[in-house]
Every structure is written in structure tokens, then in C-alpha cells.
């Protein structure tokens, strides 16, 4: 129940494409869903986050779509750039169960020039 | 921009030795965390710390692990007797707030310490 599933494992797109990364969860107590971006040799950095009371959140070229009934959420990267090449992790937490994040297994994104 | 700093960036140790990984959280943050990431795998929660005590820990965080805030700025993770399977990247994180229905749970991560147990 604490698991967060993420797909695909890896993704290759051309510059300007719109990669979409999908995550799913089971624990309905989760109420905070961040996406983290990690470059090689660096720690994860918060990209964008959403709460289940909204269905979409957009920050710059990054958009989260959230489907509460399906318990799924996804990250869309508009006009992707080679600099977006990184590993992306979705995560979930619940204020009822403490502060720790449950991370998905990650998606390695490569944006070709 | 304030950041979480971790030292050393890479630690090599022999199996059975004790290691201490060090972290300096962001100065006004009150909640501190350790996560680990085995090479190629997902980030896993180890422990959270608030008000000088552990607030939550995972199954991974057994008696070989301990955390401490020895002074007002440092936050350490000690592994008492390292095993080969402890080889991983260890991330420290901190947050200003615990996270609630109203407040965001924004955790800031350090660059990590790569622990290699030989």
C-alpha cells in the first residue's frame, strides 16, 4: 500500500517533444505529490508538486495532471530541451503518517538535440 | 540560495567499520531526514528527525544506524558496523515545515555522500 509505481523506466524524445511520465499509488491517505529531478551526481531537486484537491498544476514548461479517482498522476514536459535530460522521480507523502516521502523507481529521460 | 551540504562526497570503508556521514541542513529548517539510493534504484526513506529525536524510521533503519544533531548546525548519520549492502548514495534532506493539509512538505536534498563498503 505504501508503494508508488512509475513508468516508463526510460524515455527518449527529440528536442521540442512532450515526454509524459506516469505514476500510480494505492494509499488514499497520500495527500502531497511532488516530482523531483535528479542530475547525475546530484541530489534530487523539487520540480513541481500537487495536492489532490486540484486536477492540474502548471509551472513553466512542467505540468502535473492528477486523477484522484484513478489514483494516478503524471508529469508533462512541454517543449523539452536537452538540458531536461535527467532522472525524474515521483513521490507521495501523507501528513497523517509523517513527513517521509515514498518515491517511485524513477524515469531516465533523454532529450536528443 | 540556501542549500543542504553533505560531507564527504565519497566515503570508502572496510566492511565492519563505523562511518559517520555529515550534513548541514538549511539554517532555519526544523525537520531533517536521511534517505539512501542504491545504485540504479529508487530513493528510500531511512529516518526523520525533529526536536532532537527520531520522529519516524523505516525498516531499513535498524540498530546499526543512529542519527544525531551534535550541535546547532550538523546532522549526522552513523552506521556502526558497515555491511557490503550498505553501499549506496546517502542523501540528507531538510524542511521548514512538517507538511500538513495546509502547508507544503518541501524537502530540500543535499548532493549526497557515496558510501562504498569493501
Image (cartoon, coloured by chain):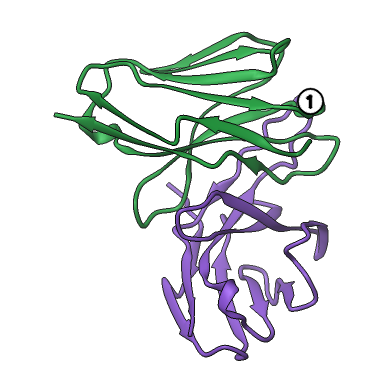
x and y percentages locating residue A40 in the rendered image = 34, 52
Vertical placement of residue A90 versus B73, above or below = above
Residue at left offset 65%, top offset 51%: B29
Side (left or right) of A22 relative to B28? left
- The color chain A is rendered in: green
Label 1, residues with CA under 10 Å away: few <14, some 14-19, many ≥20: few
Vertical placement of residue A88 versus B52, above or below = above
Rendered purple, the chain in question is B
Side (left or right) of B109 relative to A38? right
x and y percentages locating residue A60 in the rendered image = 38, 18
Residue at left offset 22%, top offset 17%: A16
Q: Quadrant of residue B62?
A: bottom right
Side (left or right) of B51 relative to A16? right
SS for tag 1? loop
x and y percentages locating residue B86 in the rendered image = 59, 73
Q: Depth check: give the residue in front, A23 or B72.
A: A23
Q: Depth check: give the residue in front, B84 or B114.
A: B84
Number of numbered discs overlaid on the protein picture: 1
Q: Depth check: give the residue in front, A30 or A10.
A: A10
Outermost residue on the left side: it is A113
> What subunit carries mark 1?
B
Residue at left offset 13%, top offset 29%: A113
Outermost residue on the right side: it is A96
x and y percentages locating residue A100 in the rendered image = 71, 46
Q: Quadrant of the N terminus of chain A?
A: top right
Q: Which residue is mark 1?
A: B101
Q: Quadrant of residue A13?
A: top left
Q: Quadrant of residue A82?
A: top left
Vertical placement of residue B61 versus A97, above or below = below
Amino acid at each position: 500500500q505504501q508503494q508508488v509505481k512509475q513508468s516508463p523506466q526510460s524515455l527518449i524524445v527529440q528536442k521540442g517533444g512532450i515526454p509524459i511520465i506516469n505514476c500510480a499509488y494505492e494509499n488514499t491517505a497520500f495527500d502531497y505529490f511532488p516530482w523531483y529531478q535528479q542530475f547525475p551526481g546530484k541530489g534530487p531537486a523539487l520540480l513541481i508538486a500537487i495536492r489532490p484537491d486540484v486536477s492540474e498544476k502548471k509551472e513553466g514548461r512542467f505540468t502535473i495532471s492528477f486523477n484522484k479517482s484513478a489514483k494516478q498522476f503524471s508529469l508533462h514536459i512541454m517543449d523539452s530541451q536537452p538540458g531536461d535530460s535527467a532522472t525524474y522521480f515521483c513521490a507521495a507523502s501523507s501528513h497523517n503518517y509523517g513527513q517521509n516521502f515514498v518515491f517511485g523507481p524513477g524515469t531516465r529521460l533523454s532529450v536528443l538535440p | 540560495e540556501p542549500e543542504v551540504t553533505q560531507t564527504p562526497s565519497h566515503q570508502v570503508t572496510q566492511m565492519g567499520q563505523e562511518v559517520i556521514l555529515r550534513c548541514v541542513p538549511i539554517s532555519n529548517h526544523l525537520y531533517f531526514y536521511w534517505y539512501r539510493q542504491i545504485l540504479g534504484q529508487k530513493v528510500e526513506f531511512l529516518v526523520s528527525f525533529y526536536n532532537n529525536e527520531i520522529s519516524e524510521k523505516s525498516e531499513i533503519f535498524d540498530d546499526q544506524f543512529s542519527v544525531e544533531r551534535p550541535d546547532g548546525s550538523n546532522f549526522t548519520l552513523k552506521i556502526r558496523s558497515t555491511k557490503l549492502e550498505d553501499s549506496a548514495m546517502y542523501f540528507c534532506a531538510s524542511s521548514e515545515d512538517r507538511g500538513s493539509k495546509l502547508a507544503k512538505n518541501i524537502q530540500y536534498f543535499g548532493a549526497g555522500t557515496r558510501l562504498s563498503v569493501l
